Image (spheres, rainbow, N blue to C red):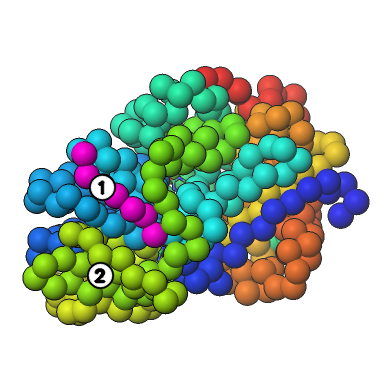
């Protein structure tokens, strides 16, 4: 721990205003549930946020698009005064869009900060994120265009070229030559797509691993851990086989030097945002909408609700009248995963430099995985950002933040101490991650 000079730790699993990291489709669900959740409820209420995007869920630009769409709908109904619940990406986008349409807007935000699951944190004056890190699907991402217009510095991450650190797991048993990850992905996607309605990722995986043929079982497990466990943070027995492996990562991803705050602060400029204002009740009647929470109330013409799916599913807001059946059914078929994050700052860089800027560590137990971003380009101080998913979170994420940071450092150093031979040699002599933009 003596090499660690600063750290920050997320707690998405325990966060009452998120109740998880991002939304996912359970074994009985489909993207139609996302559309159902985002469908207007009468003329005065609409749910927006990342969970309602049929194709870009779980990502900031999807949340942004849904906020814009809901606001355009509300403005089109002629409402003069609209409330927005939540000041994350969707809420900020909704409020800005409404303002641009000349609508009077007020945001109620439960936390004492804006940004929601982008979760800005400052260490030694440098900005990082304990939530969203990358601008994904970069070429088709409205927030990426905003970042460019604002002249923000962004740094690419090549997710197709991770440096796999050996970790404490025993080497895979020798089998037939391991097919490339690409071949495993093609085969797995075909099996997932062919799965019956109601099947989970675990169902498909178990069947494949029972009769793997020439496929390398360890390579399949590692692929699943890296691409599905890491990208969902959900138990595979819950996750939909057909719809749980949603697109997003590996399409030109770039992270923002200085953090997402540079975007959210810009979006929030001039907006009427009431921090520490949790909404706990929304009453819709013929003449308008009443928001209530913490002993105060607000009367408006309409409301856009952008709180996370986890908050809605847990009954964090009581709706009167109750949400319609299709919305409640969607809430029961969607769910939240748990991916936790650490930002670790060091006095010196002790890990191998890898041009992709991206590392992966497989833990000793099944479905225990972490991925690591070398974020030194942020301000020149050696920095690692680690994302953790899987059953080991129950053990790793215990104690104080300092203890959790120490656990994370131990996982990385145990693995970085003996990286895969050839790759490490290439990495040690490679260029540092590109810093462009
Ligand atoms: C660890 C992690 C890594 C991620 N990585 C990426 C990434 O690299 N790229 C990417 O695109 N996305 C990533 N995401 C997902 C991304 O952060 C979210 O999809 C996006 O920020 C969601 O925006 P939103 O507006 O829908 O919800 P939120 O950002 O959660 O905003 C909702 C707001 O509602 C507030 N709220 C909750 N309950 C109440 C209440 N009762 N009353 C009032 N306010 C309330 C919350 O405090 C919050 O501010 C990541 C998320 C996590 C957790």
Circle 2 residue? 290
Q: Can residue 51 be seen at all in this image of the molecule? A: no
The residue carrying pointer 2 sits among few (fewer than 14), some (14 to 19) or many (20 or more) residues within 10 Å by Cα, namely some
Highlighted magenta segment, given as a residue range: 102-108
Q: Is residue 105 magenta?
A: yes
Instruction: Place residue 375 in its image quadrant.
Output: top right
Of the numbered discs 1 and 2, the one sitting upstream in the chain is: 1
**Which sits in the foreground, 293 or 405?**
293
Q: Is mark 2 within 8 Å of ligand 1?
A: no
Q: Can residue 431 be seen at all in this image of the molecule? A: yes
Circle 1 residue? 104
**Which sits in the foreground, 91 or 411?**
91
**Element assignment for label 1:** strand
Magenta span: chief secondary structure:
strand
**What's the residue at 59%, 65% (across, down)?**
11
Q: Is residue 52 magenta?
A: no
């Amino acid at each position: 721990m003596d090499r660690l000079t600063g750290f920050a730790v997320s707690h998405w699993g325990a966060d009452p205003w998120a109740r998880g990291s991002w939304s996912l489709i359970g074994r009985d669900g489909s993207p139609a549930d996302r559309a159902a959740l985002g469908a207007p409820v009468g003329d005065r209420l609409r749910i927006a946020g990342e969970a309602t995007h049929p194709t870009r869920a779980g990502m900031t630009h999807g949340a942004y698009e849904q906020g814009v769409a809901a606001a355009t709908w509300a403005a089109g109904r002629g409402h003069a005064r609209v409330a927005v619940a939540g000041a994350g990406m969707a809420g900020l986008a909704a409020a800005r869009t409404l303002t641009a349409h000349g609508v009077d807007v007020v945001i109620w935000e439960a936390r004492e900060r804006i940004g929601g699951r982008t979760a800005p944190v400052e260490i030694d004056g440098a900005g990082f994120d304990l939530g969203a890190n990358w601008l994904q699907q970069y070429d088709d991402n409205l927030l990426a265009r905003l970042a460019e217009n604002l002249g923000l510095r962004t740094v690419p991450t090549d997710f197709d070229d991770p440096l796999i650190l050996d970790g404490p797991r025993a080497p895979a048993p020798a089998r037939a030559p391991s097919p490339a990850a690409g071949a495993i992905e093609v085969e797995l996607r075909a099996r997932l797509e062919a799965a019956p309605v109601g099947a989970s990722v675990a169902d498909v995986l178990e069947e494949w691993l029972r009769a793997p043929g020439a496929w390398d079982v360890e390579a399949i497990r590692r692929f699943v851990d890296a691409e599905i466990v890491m990208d969902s943070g959900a138990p595979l027995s819950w996750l939909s086989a057909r719809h749980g492996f949603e697109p997003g990562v590996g399409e030109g991803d770039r992270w923002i030097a200085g953090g997402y705050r540079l975007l959210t602060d810009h979006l929030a400029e001039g907006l009427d945002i009431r921090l520490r204002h949790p909404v706990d009740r929304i009453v819709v009647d013929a003449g308008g909408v009443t928001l209530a929470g913490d002993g105060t109330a607000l009367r408006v013409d309409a409301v856009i609700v952008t709180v996370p799916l986890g908050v809605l599913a847990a009954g964090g807001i009581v709706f009167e009248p109750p949400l319609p059946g299709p919305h409640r059914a969607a809430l029961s078929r969607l769910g939240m995963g748990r991916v936790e994050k650490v930002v670790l700052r060091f006095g010196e860089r002790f890990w191998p430099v890898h041009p992709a800027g991206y590392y992966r560590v497989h833990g000793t137990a099944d479905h225990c995985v972490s991925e690591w971003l070398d974020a030194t380009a942020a301000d020149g101080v050696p920095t690692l950002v680690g994302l953790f998913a899987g059953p080991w979170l129950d053990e790793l994420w215990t104690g104080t933040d300092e203890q959790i940071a120490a656990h994370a450092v131990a996982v990385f150093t145990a693995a970085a101490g003996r990286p895969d031979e050839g790759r490490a040699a290439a990495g040690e002599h490679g260029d540092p991650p590109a810093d462009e933009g």
